[in-house]
Structures are given as structure tokens and as C-alpha cells.
Amino acid sequence: MAKIQKFEDLEIWQLAKQVRVEAYRISDLDPIKSDFGLKDQFGRAAMSISDNVAEGFEYNNNPDFVRFLTYAKGSSGEFRNKLIILEETKKNFKKRL
């Protein structure tokens, strides 16, 4: 098996990048598109997942990489929490229309 030379080749980073791309798409939908604070936090949480994977990989040692993967997992939880809240908000938003 070949050693991975760059974080862009990591499947986990590729998936995290897709989460951020999807977060951009979601940010243009109601109700988040007009809530600039939430939109910013939502994007930052999504970006933090791939950022932590990339940063940890670049340290070139397993203990640091594992630590940053743990941070990425925490950011993933933060992002999922915001998705859940947005879904509930969206339901209420549609009821008001």
C-alpha cells in the first residue's frame, strides 16, 4: 500500500470538503440565507471539519493527527447540531408562510 503524501488524497478530507460545499448550497436557502450570524457559524463549523483533517495531517506524526481528527469530530457534531436546528426552523418557517 502506498503512503499518502498529501491530505487531499485522504478520503476523510474529501468527504469533509463535500460537507462544506453542501453547506454553501444550504446557506442560500430559507431561513438561513437572511440570518447572517447563523450563516457564518454554519459555514465555519463545516469548514472546520476539513481544516482540522488537513492541519493534523500536515504535522506528520500520528499523535497530532489523531488529536486533530478528534477536533474534526467535534466540529462535525457542532455542524450536525446546526443542521438539526435548521431543519426544525425550516419547518416552522414554512408553517408561517
Image (cartoon, rainbow, N blue to C red):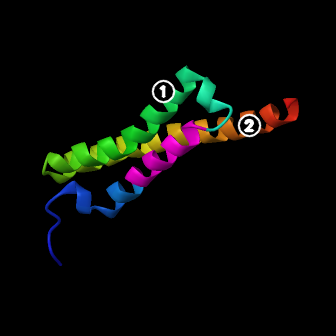
Residue at the (25%, 47%) spot, across then down: 54
Question: Image quadrant for the C terminus?
Answer: top right
Find out whether residue 54 is within the magenta segment.
no
Question: In the rendered image, which quarter is residue 3 located in?
Answer: bottom left
Where does the magenta region start and end? 16-28
Left/right of residue 83 with respect to residue 43 in the rendered view: right
Please identify the dominant SS of the magenta region.
helix
According to the picture, the residue beneath numbered tag 1 turns out to be 40
Question: Image quadrant for the N terminus?
Answer: bottom left
Label 1 crowding class (10 Å Cα cut-off): few <14, some 14-19, many 20+?
few
Count of number-bearing discs = 2
Left/right of residue 84 with respect to residue 8 in the rendered view: right
The kind of secondary structure element at disc 2 is helix
Type of amino acid under label 2: Lys
- Residue furthest to the top in view is 37
Between 29 and 38, the residue placed more toward the observer is: 29
9 is higher (above) or lower (below) than 67: below
Residue at the (45%, 40%) spot, across then down: 46
Between 34 and 46, the residue placed more toward the observer is: 34
Find out whether residue 19 is within the magenta segment.
yes
Instruction: Give the CA distance from mark 1 to mark 2.
Output: 17 Å
According to the picture, the residue beneath numbered tag 2 turns out to be 90
Residue 29 image point, x, y percent: 63, 38
Residue 68 image point, x, y percent: 29, 43
Residue 12 image point, x, y percent: 36, 58
Residue 94 appears anywhere in the view: yes
